[in-house]
Amino acid sequence: MYRLYVFDLSYFSGKMEGYLRYKGVPFTRLEPSWGELRRVIYPNTGWMKLPVIQTPDGRWLQDSTPMIRWFEAEHPEVPVVPADPVHAFLSDLLEDYADEWLWRPALYYRWAFAKDRALYRRRFVEDFLYDFPLPNPLTGLIATIRQDWTYLRGDGITRHTRAHVESIYLDTLSRLQAILSSSPFLLGGRATVADFGFFASMFRHFSLDPTPSRLMRERAPAVYEWVARLWNADGAKLADAPLSAAPGEVPPGWGPLLEDVGRSYLPYLTANAAAWRDGGQRFDFEVGGVTYRRLPAVQYRAWCREQLQARFRSLDADTQAKLQAILEAHGAWAPLWAEGVIPSGYDVQAEVPAERRPVQLTALARLRGFLFGTGWNRGSGVRPE
Ligand SMILES: N[C@@H](CCC(=O)N[C@@H](CS)C(=O)NCC(=O)O)C(=O)O
């Protein structure tokens, strides 16, 4: 049995659990406390982040996207990567976009509004911080301040940018509503990695947190329905369900999402990777008429960009030509290659990207982990030479 470590309220945990349920891969579900996160997950992976999977032979896996690729290779039945290479690349691109670009609005809606914040202050303590050695109300207060510092103020959210952050959620809702009003999943009758990418935020944050959930129910009932459909779907029963697009075609309704990717996400990924390469901890990024200031340079996201470029280059010439035409038509070609290839150094020590090795933690790392958890970058965040 695989051992899946999750937080019940977490974005990427919901994505991973939804994926394993859909695939029919059996797993034991574990919800670690803060103490277990420090004692078990941190030394074995170098990071205090979930989801994490321990394989039956004792290996540790981390990061939902490479974990899904790992499972696709180990359990090829019920594939969620489309067979057509054009669809496969586009769904990888949307998965990555949804994973990383909806994170900021998801954290914003959870922690910026009084009702949501009060609920999650309490849930954090009851779900996993119950063994933090302070009285619960104080623990909840510290956790709230930490989320605000790390993911709101620390991620460029101010009164100047909040309308833009909200527009990312609201625009995504209308794009998904348009697709899911006439299709069970994003590419027709079966789920793909693109569905699981959007599921991360749409399930555990937007459909459940009071403020964005109300917006979803009012504006995008088909998205609300899709969240439950995906959670309940048995992929094995959908193996022959038809897709909504012929090989090589852009699936219906994906155009506006690809335009968002080209307009906002890929330029962000490039700015992030360039800041990482140049040794900066923080960088400013302008998009949609606003400037996000002092965004953290995130090594994992430099790796995401590197992976998208590598995946494109691994395709045959005919597929590359088709994809280039599609990406150009949606303004996503030039931004994919701006500044060329920027090595991330993220998984240099790993044989497979998802696999983690035990690490020696210094006393300082242990103390920092105890007080604040771990930050955006895993371990020391080794930069490539
Ligand atoms: N790249 C990772 C991200 C994992 C992640 O950010 N997990 C969040 C919960 S959704 C976490 O554990 N956060 C703890 C923290 O904020 O330190 C993935 O795809 O799984």
Image (tube, rainbow, N blue to C red):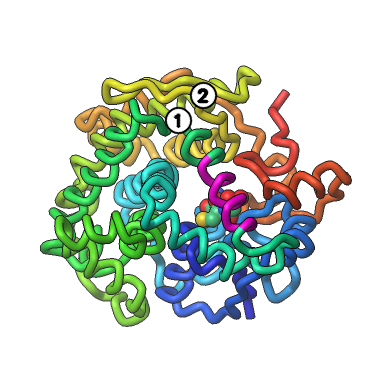
Which residue is painted at 49% across and 61% down in the image? Answer: 10
**Are there few (<14), some (14-19), or many (20+) residues within 10 Å of tag 1?**
many
Residue 294: which disc? 2
Residue type highlighted by circle 2: Arg
| Among the 4 quarters of the image, the one containing residue 219 | bottom left
Which residue is painted at 56% across and 60% down in the image? Answer: 70
Comparing 337 with 284, the one in front is: 284
**Are there few (<14), some (14-19), or many (20+) residues within 10 Å of tag 2?**
some
Q: Is the magenta stretch mostly helix, strand or loop?
A: helix
Which residue is painted at 22% across and 32% down in the image? Answer: 330
Magenta residue check for 207: no
Secondary element under disc 2, as helix, strand or loop, is strand
Whole-percent x, y for residue 356 in the image: 71, 54
Q: Left or right: where does residue 68 sit relative to residue 215?
A: right
Secondary element under disc 1, as helix, strand or loop, is loop
- Could you tell me if the residues under marks 1 and 2 are in contact, i.e. CB atoms within 8 Å? yes
- Cα–Cα gap, marks 1 and 2: 6 Å
In the image, residue 21 above or below residue 133: below
The reply to whether residue 63 is visible in this rendering is no
Residue type highlighted by circle 1: Gly
Of callouts 1 and 2, the N-terminal one: 1
Residues in magenta, as a range = 138-148
Whole-percent x, y for residue 140 in the image: 58, 57
Q: Mark 1 points at which residue?
A: 156
In the image, residue 336 above or below residue 278: below
Whole-percent x, y for residue 317 in the image: 36, 36
